[in-house]
Amino acid sequence: MLIDWSVRDLDVFLALADTLNFRRAAERCHLSQPAVSGVVTRLERSVGSRLFDRSTRAVQLTAVGQVLLDQVRLLRRQADASAQAVRDVVELRAGRVRVAALPSLAATVVPRAFARFAALHPAVRLEMADTLSGPAFDLVRAGQVDLALTAANPDYADLHYTPLVSDGFVLLLPASHPLAAAAGPLRWADAADLDHISMPRPTSVRQYAEAALLQGGRRFEPRFEVEHLATITAMVAAGLGVAALPELAALVAPSAQVVQRRLTAPDLRRPIGLVTRQGQALSPAALAMVALLDDEAQRLVPPPGG
Amino acid sequence: MLIDWSVRDLDVFLALADTLNFRRAAERCHLSQPAVSGVVTRLERSVGSRLFDRSTRAVQLTAVGQVLLDQVRLLRRQADASAQAVRDVVELRAGRVRVAALPSLAATVVPRAFARFAALHPAVRLEMADTLSGPAFDLVRAGQVDLALTAANPDYADLHYTPLVSDGFVLLLPASHPLAAAAGPLRWADAADLDHISMPRPTSVRQYAEAALLQGGRRFEPRFEVEHLATITAMVAAGLGVAALPELAALVAPSAQVVQRRLTAPDLRRPIGLVTRQGQALSPAALAMVALLDDEAQRLVPPPGG
DNA sequence: CACACTTACGATATTCGTAAGGATT
DNA sequence: AATCCTTACGAATATCGTAAGTGTG
């Protein structure tokens, strides 16, 4: 006895067990009455036992049919639950999105996108890992996050990178600093000899600052090296120095005592993008998240042309 | 999204989710590799979402596929359990047989058949209702028992009757009674004037005794009327009278102080048979029980020719 | 170029509806 | 006569395997 029933078969069986009438069961299943007869005959052959005692005048379940009825009810319920579970994921009523992001993005773009996403899809769980760029790639590669929002990095060619925005650099100055009042953008060369506060070498903030000054033939040797963006802002506000930061990083901890001035020459931009696993499609929820992340990134960092 | 998967579809999905390789999944399902490809494509169309991310070099579950996998595992387990439940009933590893029987059969044929049945099929539950003939038919009609073992009764033409055996009548005498020592069978006329102990009018025992004497033009007026066969035997043993009983009824409570003599002229026989519902097949277990009941009945009441 | 999945296509099997048949009330 | 289930049969559909196609390492 090999059972290879389809869900439709289950429904026909249930309809007949319920109505005990082939014609009404056929109506309920949108089939002709002989079709129901055929299905039942086929099911009985597959089970190896009669399921219904039937004369032209009465239809009733056999003992085997009774036992099967309970089982089929369970199966049908389970099939419905399965379909619902899949629908929930496809239609964003369930699921999970895990995002890794650089600190400057984890405190700006991501929270805004998460807030909108949570309002739209409250049942989808959201997780964020705020990490440096390297670990962000590693998390994607290991499948521990669905996507990472970070600066481009050619070292991770096995992962898929989609550019989103690029943010320019600004110099944070104490409001009392002479350069704070100057009109127009500053040049990197103007900032080279000031006391700088920056972050450790592995961070993109530090990497880009070093690269910018290197183009002018200068080495970048910050006076202070701290871990957190909020610390930098506070130290600048206290007059301990200046800090060259990407725009988004500068947004993290705004301060009334700190002035931002755009840095040019070179007009270096930090490319920010989405990192995902090669050849692995994003879940429906992750796709929706990408749209919101993109939108929020565009709002926070208007393209240089605009 | 309409899900109409067959069990085979589940197996193909599980095989691919397990192997992550179309060729090996095809082997496991005894299909060609393109057939697996087609099944998966069809499933994905029915779900409305990709289930596997696949390039020519790697196959892996999507987020939707992951969710579905858990569901399908449950479904497949449930389908197996259902098939097992049906097999159990068909192969007598589960189920129930409910029998109604006259007191004389409930204490003779049925216990022997039950004992053999229980030894062969220990997991099948057995139930017996020892009732008079009328209630036995009623229990069958109401579906509260699978079958009844009782004397034929033309009043219940809507039920199906299968003759099994017929038992002749014997006269129970105190061992000290003059007729106890006589050679050869007794005639009903010989017993007519003795003090009789019998059962109430609705019983087959009483009905047949009255009918037998009526053929000789005599009325049957028992001196004592009691409810239970064991009481009859005890009263006969005490010398209070004689009792005309069907063979099987006489077997119920044997006593050393009681002698049985066959009654003839007329050679009345009580037809015993199986009563079942019209147009309702017996369960596999009930069918097996019928065979044993038949066998035990033949053993206890050898046909008159033998 | 070897391996893996997809597409194309013809053969086979299954499923379904219409029509006719048989049984029961 | 009306109702109900089964059988017969032709048509539409689905499924499968072989063979060819496409992409990747």
Image: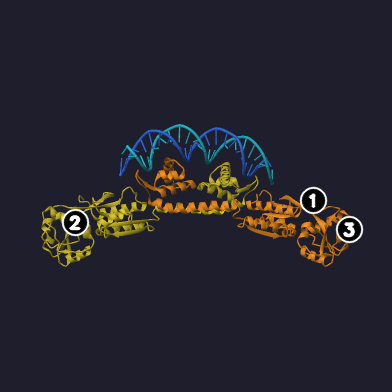
Chain colours: A yellow, B orange, C cyan, D blue
> Which element is circle 3 on?
helix
> Which element is circle 1 on?
loop
Amino acid carrying mark 2 in the image: Gln
**Where in the figure is residue A295, as x and y percent of width and height?**
28, 53
Q: Which residue, given by chain and number where applicable, does mark 3 sit on?
A: B190
The image shows residue B193, relative to residue A13, as above or below, that is below
Answer yes or no: is residue A246 visible: no
Foreground of the two, B185 or B75? B185
Q: Which numbered disc, 3 or 1, marks the residue closer to the eye?
A: 1
**Quadrant position of residue A252:** bottom left
Q: Which residue, given by chain and number where applicable, does mark 1 sit on?
A: B304
Amino acid carrying mark 1 in the image: Pro
Q: Please give the count of numbered marks on the rendered protein.
A: 3
Q: Is residue A199 left or right of residue B47?
A: left
**Quadrant position of residue D1:** top right
User: Crowding at label 3, few (<14), some or many (≥20) Cα neighbours within 10 Å?
Assistant: few
Instruction: Kindly identify which chain the residue marked by label 2 belongs to.
Output: A
User: Crowding at label 1, few (<14), some or many (≥20) Cα neighbours within 10 Å?
Assistant: few
Q: Is residue B143 left or right of residue A282?
A: right
Q: CA distance from mark 3 to mark 1?
A: 22 Å
Q: Label 1 near label 3: C-beta < 8 Å?
A: no
User: Crowding at label 2, few (<14), some or many (≥20) Cα neighbours within 10 Å?
Assistant: some
Q: Are marks 3 and 2 on the same chain?
A: no
Q: Label 2 near label 1: C-beta < 8 Å?
A: no
